[in-house]
Amino acid sequence: MLNLFFQYVYFANYGQILIESIACVIFVYFLAGLTYKYFIDKADEVQRLKTALSFLVSILIAFGISLLIMFAVAYIGWFVVFFQFLTKVYFNFALMVTILFPLFKMFLARFSRNESFLSSPENKKSFTRRFLFLLLLSWTAFLMFLIFDLFGIPMGELIPLDPLNPNFDPFLLGFEWTFVMLIIDIIITRLVISIISIDKRPPKNALKSSTLAAAISAFVLWSFQLLIFEIILSRVLKITLFEQDIRVLAIGVSLLYFLSLYGFLRFKYLPKAMEADKGLIQSTDALVIKESNVILNVEDLRTYFYTEEGVVHAVEGVSFKINEGEVLGLVGETGCGKSVTALSILQLIQSPGEILSGKVEFRGEDLLKVSTTEMLAYRGDKITMIFQDPLNSLNPVFTVGKQISEVYLLHKKKELLIEASKHKNRSTFGVAREWSKQLLKDLNIPSPENIIDRYPHELSGGMRQRIQIAMGIAGSPKLLIADEPTTALDVTVQNQILKLLKDLKKKYNTSILFITHDLGIISKMCDRVAVMYTGSIVEYGSTKQIFTNPYHPYTKGLLSAVPIEGEEKELLIIPGMVPNLIYPPSGCRFHPRCPKRFQPCDSELPISIEVAPNYFVNCHLYDPKFNKTEEVSTS
């Protein structure tokens, strides 16, 4: 008999325990997730991933521990007889919640190295308060169900799957199916919203808040219905007004959900969103800008890449300034660090790269000290970048119109609201689309009404480059970083793009960091030029002076290799190749290729010397402490 009893426990309970535990952990995951969502929304991208990883590991461990306890209790038959509540779903839920939060706190501190949101005393207090509330809620539910058991009110055996089974329990099954129906209703809501015209959709935040509030309200109301009619009336007072049925549940829960959704959206969250938009329109807050015409100040910027072969010294002590309304050209051979410098300014360096030191001040604020989340407020709005490769820079699953409109929707919301308010039945989405279409017209893109609905793979390389330029200038940035924006374009389109950038500079007083290896474009576009070689700036000054009277041997070599229209001359080639930046030459990095090198060039690093007002050269030839008569030939 004892053997048969254990077999019954094994086959009847183990599978049901597993199913019930899985359902329980899903419910705990969504419910407990609300306690840290408030903090994770304020974290940067890296911190967000660490928080999510900590929560996932914690809930898996809590699931495993609770499952082992329930399996152990189910296996020891005599123990079940006296402590049957240890195999109940309400005990499993309370146990998971109790185990989850200490684990979550421990793993978060471990993964984040004490740089998490719990480092703040205020956040720590708020986190503890939310945890205690959920803990109180779970153990209150446990005590309520335990009282039902002690007073002989039957609550079924684990998860009842067969309505013909004598252990079938509409109360427990009602809880489970209520949760399932709400998930189905939320999915239906998302599908319906997706087919509604984008102009008529409610704001995303209002819809999200209303959906969550409606789901919680429907779950609580239907749970009270189950408690009153199934437990109190039917089981205690033996009064059955109606049978709990899955069809009644589906209709009732869905009706409660959609009525609550309409109520919350119509009377609470939609007016709240409209009030916020109204406040945004009326807001006259402005950025506090220091009284200085220097918009970007880069000092001693160093960026390295840690590869398996060694450390790549990509950017080594770069310093320059850009004034408001100025165009600074960054010129040099391929692989000298121009693009890495631009990516470092925007904090877009990815592993294995790392920004070691330096200062990048934009309007007086050091961008290297702000968080990733704060940096999002700069990218695309105050600072934008036109990337070198348009194919990999555009999202292949969205039309180009949506990608351009996104810039307006994220960074020009106030302007969109003002424009939309001038026209009846016109949304911000419609205004953003019209602005995107007009921008394509300004870029001389043929048939913009058709191009706007195409995907990047349907366009040519030059067309994709112009789309990317449109995204870069859509936000009217104060600083535009253009990384070889005309490389993929023919000569006629190049002139159009350069003219467009000049107009942008004139209209919005936009400063431009123009990266290229084309000295012809530099002479047309730039007010000042910084010449880079192997991660360092070797010459930095006005465009006119660099083209008429260059100082550094590398700059002279670049200019001597450029043909001049109407002039016959022998084109000179700089001997050698750009060195491997994993093993850069000692001393001056250009000395192995320099025809003017002399004794200190191969051992000492050159310093920046101001050879003329606001004109700097990194070369030992102009350093007063060295005797230039020691100059030797390259033979």
Image: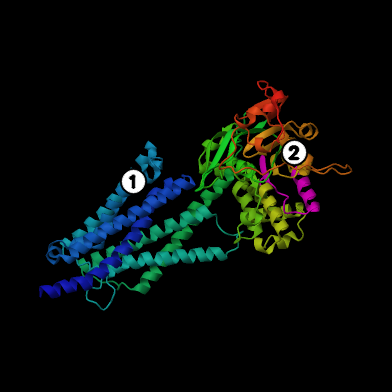
Q: Residue 163 at what x, y percent from top left?
A: 28, 76
Q: Which residue bears the numbered disc 1?
A: 105
Query: Measured along the vertical axis of the image, is residue 23 above or below residue 492?
Result: below
The residue closer to the viewer here, 115 or 585, is 585
Query: Measured along the vertical axis of the image, is residue 627 above or below residue 418?
Result: above
* Measured Cα–Cα span from mark 2 to mark 1: 60 Å
The residue closer to the viewer here, 216 or 561, is 561
Task: Identify the magenta region.
Answer: 475-503
Which quadrant does the C terminus fall into? top right
Which quadrant does the N terminus fall into? bottom left
Q: Residue 533 at what x, y percent from top left?
A: 66, 39
Q: Which amino acid does label 2 sit on?
A: Gly
Q: Which residue is drawn at 33% across and 43% down?
A: 128
Residue sticking out furthest to the top: 625
Q: Residue at x 28, y 66 (%)?
A: 18
User: Crowding near pointer 1: few (<14 within 10 Å), some, many (20+)?
Assistant: some
Q: Which residue bears the numbered disc 2?
A: 557
**Lateral position of residue 500 relative to residue 336, left or right:** right
Indicate which label's residue lies in the foreground, 2 or 1: 2
Dividing the picture into quadrants, the one containing residue 396 is: bottom right
Q: What residue type is labelled 1?
A: Lys
**Lateral position of residue 400 relative to residue 100, left or right:** right
Of labels 2 and 1, earlier in sequence is 1
The verdict on residue 27 being magenta is no
Q: Please, what secondary structure does the residue beneath circle 2 have?
A: helix
